[in-house]
Structure formats: structure tokens, C-alpha cells
Image: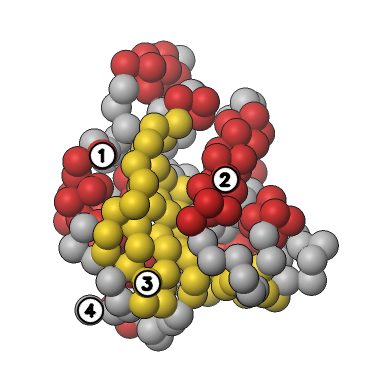
């Protein structure tokens, strides 16, 4: 039987060292965005799979964000998100929706669409659809940043260890090669950055794409 990730349980009790890996990831994400995005005015950000987002506050603190929108289908996580208040006074909004059902969403024009650890929770077709969902929300020539676990030796070692002691929580996680993600992304835009983040322990691939246009 294939198990799914229990997101309510995850948000209630994240892995002990998660605060360190999140801090490292937030720094890398902010550096990337600051390097490539036009900061001549305020920007609007959409995060997919960002219930109880641990990246909203550092991004709003480091950038001039007028609107931060989160789309996720975990009601519990979205309620936790509502308790977070960016000190910048950024408008925060949320939408309870499944990323695979993005075809029913209203087309949007965010300057930046991001996801951190989302697209690996689907089979191959689902991952392709989840990637396409990002580009349904970004404006023409806007940026899409996607991070995902990739099966390096260190990833495989730590995952096997946690599985052996019954502490692995992401039962439906499918670590992705950069090639698979790149092939899907290049259908929608120009890839301008690719890298690996070993500081996250469970090695994360990063890909940043400049959109050709909005929804195809």
C-alpha cells in the first residue's frame, strides 16, 4: 500500500533539525531572488504548497513585497499561516486548492511564483502538472523558482536511515533528477539558474525560470 504524507502531522511536529535547514534554504532563496528579480518597485509573490510557509517572513523582510499569496490544500496549515504577520504590512492571502487542479484557477500575474518541496509528491505526470501550475500564476517574463529533493548519496543515506528507524514522514516523496525538472520547465520559459543545495541535508535541487508568458 502506498502511503501519503500526513501534512497535518508534519506541521504539528516537524523534524527536529528543520529550523536549521529552513534557515539555510531561506537565505539561498533570498539571494537568488535578489539577484534576478526587478526590485525597482514592489513585487507580488505566490507560493504553491506553502501552507504555514516558513519562507514568507524572511522574503517579506528582505524584499519589498506588496502581496504574498499562498495556494495549498491543507486547511490546518493555512490556518497556521493566518497567524503570521509580516512586519512590513504586506497583504497576505491564501487559497485552499489542489495544485493538480490548477486548470480551474483564475489566471494571475505574480512577479514571482515559488514552491519549496512540492513537485516531488506526485507521479511523473503529476509532477509535470504541478510544474505547469506555477506558470499559470506568473506574469509574462516573471520568475518561477522551484526547489525539490534530488537523489544524491547523502540524500539516500539519510532517508534510508530515517526509514529504518520509522522516522521518515514523506512517504510519497519521489526525489527528482534535475534533468526531469529541467525538461518540464523549459516548455514554459528560459532556465536561468540551476544548482544543488547540500546544506539542506536532504539535497535540494534549485531551478529558476523566466516565463515566456502566462497560462498556455
Where does residue 129 sit, x and y in percent of width and height? Answer: 24, 63
User: Circles 4 and 2: CB distance less than 8 Å?
Assistant: no
Of mark 1 and mark 4, the one earlier in the sequence is 1
Of mark 3 and mark 4, the one earlier in the sequence is 3
Of mark 3 and mark 2, the one earlier in the sequence is 2
**Dot 3 crowding, Cα within 10 Å, few <14, some 14–19, many 20+:** some
Tell me if 53 is positioned left or right of 98 in this view: right
Residues under labels 4 and 2: Cα distance?
29 Å
Task: Examine the image and state in which quarter residue 82 appears.
Answer: bottom right
Residues under labels 3 and 1: Cα distance?
22 Å
**Dot 1 crowding, Cα within 10 Å, few <14, some 14–19, many 20+:** many
Q: Which residue has dot 4 on it?
A: 216
Picture quarter with the C terminus: bottom left
Q: Circle 1 — which element?
A: helix
Residues under labels 3 and 4: Cα distance?
13 Å
Mark number for residue 120?
A: none
Mark number for residue 31?
A: 2
Mark number for residue 141?
A: 3
Mark yes or no: residue 57 visible: no
Q: Residue at x 32, y 16 (%)?
A: 153
Where does residue 8 sit, x and y in percent of width and height? Answer: 55, 49
Amino acid at each position: 500500500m502506498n502511503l501519503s504524507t500526513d501534512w497535518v502531522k508534519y506541521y504539528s511536529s516537524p523534524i527536529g533539525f528543520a529550523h536549521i535547514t529552513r534557515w539555510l534554504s531561506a537565505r539561498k532563496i533570498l539571494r537568488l531572488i535578489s539577484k534576478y528579480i526587478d526590485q525597482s518597485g514592489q513585487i507580488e509573490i505566490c507560493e504553491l504548497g506553502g501552507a504555514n510557509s516558513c519562507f514568507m517572513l524572511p522574503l517579506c523582510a528582505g524584499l519589498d513585497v506588496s502581496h504574498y499569496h499562498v495556494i495549498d490544500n491543507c486547511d490546518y496549515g493555512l490556518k497556521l499561516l493566518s497567524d503570521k504577520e509580516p512586519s512590513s504590512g504586506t497583504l497576505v492571502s491564501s487559497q485552499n486548492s489542489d495544485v493538480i487542479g490548477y486548470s480551474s484557477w483564475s489566471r494571475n500575474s505574480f512577479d514571482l511564483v515559488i514552491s519549496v518541496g512540492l513537485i516531488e509528491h506526485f507521479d511523473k505526470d503529476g509532477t509535470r502538472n504541478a510544474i505547469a501550475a506555477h506558470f499559470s500564476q506568473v506574469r509574462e517574463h516573471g520568475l518561477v523558482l522551484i526547489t525539490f529533493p534530488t537523489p544524491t548519496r547523502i540524500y539516500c543515506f539519510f532517508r534510508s536511515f530515517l526509514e529504518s528507524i520509522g522516522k521518515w514522514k514523506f512517504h510519497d516523496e519521489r526525489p527528482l533528477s534535475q534533468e526531469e525538472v529541467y525538461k518540464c520547465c523549459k516548455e514554459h520559459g528560459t532556465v536561468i539558474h540551476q544548482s544543488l543545495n547540500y546544506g539542506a541535508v536532504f539535497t535540494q535541487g534549485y531551478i529558476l525560470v523566466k516565463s515566456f508568458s502566462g497560462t498556455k
